[in-house]
Image (spheres, grey):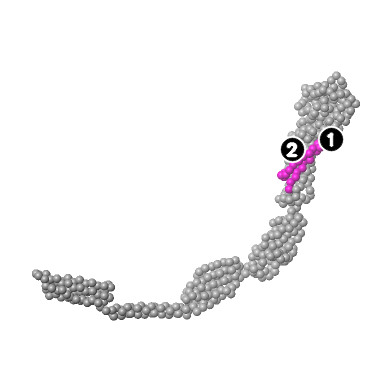
Amino acid sequence: MAFCWLYLCIYSLWFKVSVAKGDSWHLEVPPSVVGLEGSCVVIPCLLSYPGPDRKASDLTGIWFTDSNEIVYHSSTTKISTNFQHRTSLLGELRHRNCSLKISPLQHTDSGPFTFRIEIEDFNKYSFAKNKVSITVKDTPEPPTLSVEQRIKSGKKVTTTCTFLHSCPSDPPNLTWSHQGKVSSQSTRQTNGQWKVTSSLSFTPTKRDHEKLLSCTAVFTGGKKVSSITVLNVTYPPVSVEVISSSSVQEGDSVELNCSCDGNPAAHAYQWFTEKGTLVSEGQNYMLKSVKRHPEPLYCTAINTEGQARSTPIQLNVLYPPEIKVGSSCTSEISTATCLCMVDSHPTSDIKWWTSDPSKLLNSSNTEIHGSLTIVTLQGVLDSNTVHCHASNSQGNSTMTLQVPHNGKLVYIAVAVSVFLVVITGLTVWMVKRSHVSSKTEEPVTHRKTEENVTSQPGSERECKAYSTYGGSQNVYGNMTLEEEQCSDTYEVTDGDAVYANM
């Protein structure tokens, strides 16, 4: 709006300078203008009159119809009822600006309209040859939306939206459906209308492709109009992936498809091994006689905007169990340990038995490393052979494993145990015997003696006996006293037992 006012002022100033003062009566107006019903319309008007500039109080401006109905008057009381409170002058007569504003515009406001100037104490003049008509429209013209046919993802772009209006004092409000930097400019047209150009600058992304972009103008009075376009954003391939069957049997063929999203569509495809070796070109790749452990593959999609690759794909190859050559048994004395290594996909169910398949043995441990399954059987086996049986949805396989010298080792173990028991017993017996012999040969240093048995006065007799033994001999002795009992004292060493009867 500020720009419109500035333009009017500049235009008025230019007209004032271009018309020589005092030359003649002159009015510059368009023959017709276009206005939107319910909005406002402005009839641009610039005048000149003879003589010098006048004070505002000396000037009276009047707009009227052919039927002499007063549309505008400097004295508002003289304005016709049909135009009361709907008309005003933009600018000032003393600046020779006689532009008329009608708001809101009605269908009956079609004109034609004539301007008259009255100068106090000078003259009056009606510009009957400069009539102005108004074309009243029910709906506004849709804006013109301009955008490049193709815009690049990541590259800044500027779009424009242009529309016309007839109310520079209250221009329409314009909005964009996309975020970005907005700028506007307004220019006056020859038919009394104004052209507004709004610019939107933004950096498009892949997500903007095929997205609706619109600009909407809302006019005074509430009427609005929009223009919509679909964005065409170019971008390099994205979401590149390999599509194939969920699984394939070993030896069969499988077709791989490279899919991607890009604008424009990819025009070339390449297939590589995970190590980067080019193996094929084209959107589809037929892989024949698939092996059980194929190297992962990826594809590269290319369009005019760039290229991108998929993540490597590992084919899901199904094959029956294969019991590896390294499967075997080992034995330690009476315990056997057997390993059965099975390569299969899907993972196999592994069972053990000796001579009777209906009597299964329990595995002690199971380890799975990718497609390789290692099962351990550990325990006492009463057979020279053990069978490992693996099965999955693709087939089965059985391998007989030899248990090395399993039976002989049991007997050897028993014999060795018996031998050790005998040797231990003999050793203990010989040690004891040697110990007894050494005790027998030891000299006796003390013998039991009886001494100092004397008669004492009266009825008392004192009897003393001392006996000392060395070694571990058992001593049995009997002592009998004819008349009296006496107490004997014995000293025993080395914990030998002594028995005495008295």
The quarter of the rendered structure image containing the N terminus is: top right
Amino acid type at image mark 2: Asn
Residue 345 percent coordinates (x, y): 61, 67
Q: Nearer the viewer, residue 294 or 76?
A: 294
Residue at x 66%, y 63% (from the top left corner): 313
- Which residue position holds label 1? 191
Q: Earlier in the sequence, mark 1 or mark 2?
A: 2
User: Relative to 316, does residue 142 appear above or below in the rendering?
Assistant: above
Q: In this view of the protein, can residue 318 be seen by the observer?
A: yes
Q: Horizontal placement of 354 versus 320: left or right?
A: left
Q: Which mark is residue 19?
A: none
User: Relative to 407, does residue 316 appear above or below in the rendering?
Assistant: above
User: Relative to 228, does residue 290 appear above or below in the rendering?
Assistant: below
The quarter of the rendered structure image containing the C terminus is: bottom left
Residue lying furthest left in this view?
458
Helix, strand or loop at label 2? It is: strand
Q: Which mark is residue 173?
A: 2
Crowding at mark 2 (Cα within 10 Å: few <14, some 14-19, many 20+): few
Amino acid type at image mark 1: Asn
Q: In this view of the protein, can residue 209 be seen by the observer?
A: no
The image quarter containing residue 104 is top right
Q: Nearer the viewer, residue 23 or 120?
A: 23
Residue 367 percent coordinates (x, y): 55, 67
